Image (cartoon, helix red, strand yellow):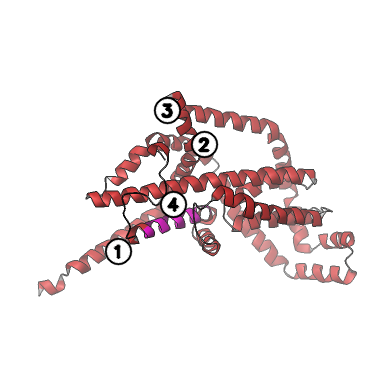
């Protein structure tokens, strides 16, 4: 009778489900702390190639890490002196005029001015303005909701100090951490499998983070330069903001373009056609020229899956969830391929990084 009540297979399944539930509960409870450590790991992946190169020159990893941090601090100070005052000035101006811009959006006051510039008929102007007035409440509600979501990262601005500090430990002890994970395997086969998974994730994250940063930098510089040249209001705010949006695959660039165009409309910018052409041309260059060359095949994830991941991540964890959703999907893909592959597990699916570091 006891044998029928106690089934070893059922017990193992129940234990696995219980452990999974406890793990998910822990991840939910410690969401902010884990997010902080995750960004520290991503920052370590970004600076790792430069650290590895300087390590060979300076003959010491600690010396290389210190040199890289000094270089980054010097670059930030230089950029701050060059464009910091302009960004601060435009930021204060935008913060002051933002309520007025939102009110103009809801009331449709800007329609008449744009209609006169582009030769719209009075009837069309009245129709568009009536449509905006009819949906004023929805526009204000969606604008407020978007502002609250974008304000969440600003509440953790102090992370900008903690992330580089925590990254020091991952840069210094990354190889030891990886070896510790591999040692969790009980048999040589399990250790080889874990080693292959760690190697694949290592290469994928390193390639992805560095490629995304390069693409984001190109967008930030291009937007800031061209929008300034075109005399678009708040160019030194919109340019870096577009660069930040570039980190959110597919959805972020589209949101950046819409934000720039809407701000131009609300500030009565006269050359909307040329601005629209620039935004469209830049997306073509970025998506079909820059991204394939820089990103390569580091993810191999279809665009529709990326969109699903970004939207789902945003629903689950806000802006942070949208940022990490695609790397998380790529990691799950690596795990699935490793677990289901019938090929040899002696070597990772992708080339290992130099010197075996992160």
Residue that label 3 marks: 62
Which dot, 1 or 4, sits closer to the camera? Answer: 1
First in residue order: circle 3 vs circle 4: 4
Is 275 on the left-hand or right-hand side of 331? Answer: right
First in residue order: circle 4 vs circle 2: 4
Residue that label 2 marks: 161
Q: Disc 3 and disc 2: Cα gap in Å?
A: 19 Å
Which dot, 3 or 1, sits closer to the camera? Answer: 3
Q: As rendered, which of 160 and 12 lies closer to the eye?
A: 12
User: For the view shown, which residue lies furthest in the front direction?
Assistant: 343
Q: Which mark is residue 17?
A: 1
User: Which residue is depicted at the point 64% across and 44% down?
Assistant: 218
Where is residue 336? Give x, y as percent: 38, 60
Q: Are marks 1 and 4 in contact (CB under 8 Å)?
A: no
Residue that label 4 marks: 31
Q: Disc 3 and disc 4: Cα gap in Å?
A: 30 Å
Is 29 on the left-hand or right-hand side of 207? Answer: left
- Image height of 97 relative to 343, above or below: above
In the picture, which quadrant includes the N terminus? bottom left
Q: Disc 1 and disc 4: Cα gap in Å?
A: 21 Å
Q: As rendered, which of 207 and 313 lies closer to the eye?
A: 207
Which dot, 3 or 4, sits closer to the camera? Answer: 3
- The secondary element bearing badge 1 is classed as helix
């Amino acid at each position: 009778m006891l044998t029928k009540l106690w089934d070893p297979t059922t017990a193992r399944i129940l234990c696995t489900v219980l452990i999974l539930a406890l793990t998910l509960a822990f991840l939910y409870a410690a969401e902010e702390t884990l997010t902080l450590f995750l960004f520290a790991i991503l920052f370590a992946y970004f600076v790792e190639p430069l650290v590895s190169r300087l390590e060979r020159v300076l003959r010491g990893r600690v010396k290389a890490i210190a040199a890289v941090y000094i270089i980054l601090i010097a670059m930030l100070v230089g950029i701050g002196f060059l464009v910091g005052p302009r960004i601060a000035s435009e930021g204060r101006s935008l913060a002051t005029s933002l309520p007025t811009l939102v009110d103009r959006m809801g009331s449709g006051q800007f329609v008449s001015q744009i209609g006169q510039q582009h030769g719209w008929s009075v009837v069309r102007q009245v129709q568009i303005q009536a449509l905006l007035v009819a949906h004023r409440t929805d526009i204000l509600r969606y604008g407020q909701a978007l502002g609250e979501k974008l304000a969440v990262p600003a509440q953790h601005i102090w992370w900008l100090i903690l992330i580089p500090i925590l990254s020091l430990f991952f840069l210094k002890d990354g190889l030891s951490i990886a070896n510790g994970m591999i040692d969790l395997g009980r048999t040589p086969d399990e250790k080889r499998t874990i080693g292959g998974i760690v190697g694949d994730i290592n290469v994928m994250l390193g390639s992805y983070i560095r490629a995304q940063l390069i693409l984001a930098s190109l967008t930030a510089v291009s937007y800031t330069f061209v929008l300034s040249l075109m005399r678009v209001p708040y160019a030194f705010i919109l340019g870096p903001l577009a660069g930040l949006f570039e980190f959110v695959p597919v959805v972020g660039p589209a949101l950046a373009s819409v934000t720039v165009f809407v701000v131009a409309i609300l500030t009565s910018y006269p050359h909307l056609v040329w601005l629209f052409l620039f935004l469209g041309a830049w997306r073509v260059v970025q998506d079909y020229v820059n991204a394939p060359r820089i990103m390569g095949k580091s993810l191999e994830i279809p665009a529709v899956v990326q969109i699903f991941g970004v939207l789902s991540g945003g629903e689950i964890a806000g802006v942070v969830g949208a940022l990490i959703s695609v790397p998380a999907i790529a990691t799950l893909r690596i795990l699935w391929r490793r677990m289901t592959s019938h090929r040899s597990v002696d070597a990772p699916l992708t080339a290992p990084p130099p010197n075996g570091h992160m």
